[in-house]
Amino acid sequence: MRTPVIAGNWKMYKTADEAGAFVREFLPLVQDADGVEIVLAPPFPSLAAVAALTRGTRIGVASQNVHFADEGAYTGEVSARMVRDAGAAYAIVGHSERRHYFAETDEFVNRKVRAALAAGLVPILCLGETLAERESGRTIEVVERQIRAGLAEVPGSAAGRILVAYEPVWAIGTGKTATPAQAQEVHAFLRGTLKQMWGEEAAGAVRILYGGSVKPENAAELMGQEDIDGALVGGASLSAQSFANIVKHR
Ligand code: PGA
């Protein structure tokens, strides 16, 4: 049994005060939600505050990015060890906005995945095709390249400490969700690829989340699919009420 994960990616939203207000409103709303891992990914400046406010609760904290080096002259960057030290247990890696706006390549993303694991963080490896790639029939080819490259040199023994998030780029922030069948098709393919890489048992241990316009209204249907083990939620995670509704209606 894979424990589902519902993760909220706040992107570049919320000051520390706003983050604190969210957590205070959110905690009582999810206190009875059993059998689910809940993750919040605030911007760096409020990461430590959110980690402190959620310590001892069922909520874990993620960074939205990490650098791949342990430390060094990389102005503006933050290492996995620093993120861990600030109280995070997870790190989002390779989000499509980072790939698109910050030119992150598969090779970069792979180094970040390995840096996160080495620092004791659970990487949330994001991947997904663009609209042009889907329309030209290249979805499977693209996600296969992304998952194989993203997890290169990662051993199958790490399977339980890795989350993959399939996020079709055309569904992110657009209100257009992949249908449950479209998402399940890609999730099943990703799990099959993991099986080729790592064998059946390890592949079965990886939680594969869906992301892209997940809302309280569509969460249950998406997460009812066999290979969809949770959600990575952007816009709908900014309100405590709507994010709690996704946690409860998974
Ligand atoms: P969205 O974002 O839920 O606003 O589509 C998802 C994401 O970018 O992780």
Image (spheres, rainbow, N blue to C red):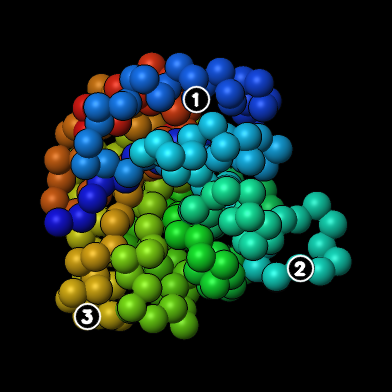
The amino acid type, in three-letter code, at marker 3 is: Gly
Query: Label 3's element?
Result: loop
- Disc 3 to disc 2, C-alpha distance: 34 Å
Q: Which residue lies under the disc numbered 1?
A: 23
Residue placed most toward the observer, 117 or 68 = 117
- Disc 2 to disc 1, C-alpha distance: 31 Å
Q: Is residue 13 above or below residue 225?
A: above
The image shows residue 145 at horizontal and vertical percentages of 42, 71
The image shows residue 70 at horizontal and vertical percentages of 70, 70
- Camera-nearest label, 2 or 1: 1
Label whose residue precedes the other's in the sequence (3 or 1) = 1
Residue at 63 percent of width and 25 percent of height: 14
Q: If the image is split into quadrants, where does the N terminus sit? A: bottom left
Residue at 76 percent of width and 68 percent of height: 71
Residues packed near mark 3 inside 10 Å, few (<14), some (14 to 19) or many (20 plus): few
Residue placed most toward the observer, 119 or 52 = 52
- Disc 3 to disc 1, C-alpha distance: 39 Å
Q: Which mark is residue 199?
A: 3
Is disc 1's CB within 8 Å of ligand 1? no
As drawn, is 125 to the left or to the right of 93?
left
Q: Which residue lies under the disc numbered 2?
A: 71
Asked if the residue at tag 1 contacts the one at tag 2, i.e. Cβ–Cβ closer than 8 Å, the answer is no
Residue at 67 percent of width and 27 percent of height: 16
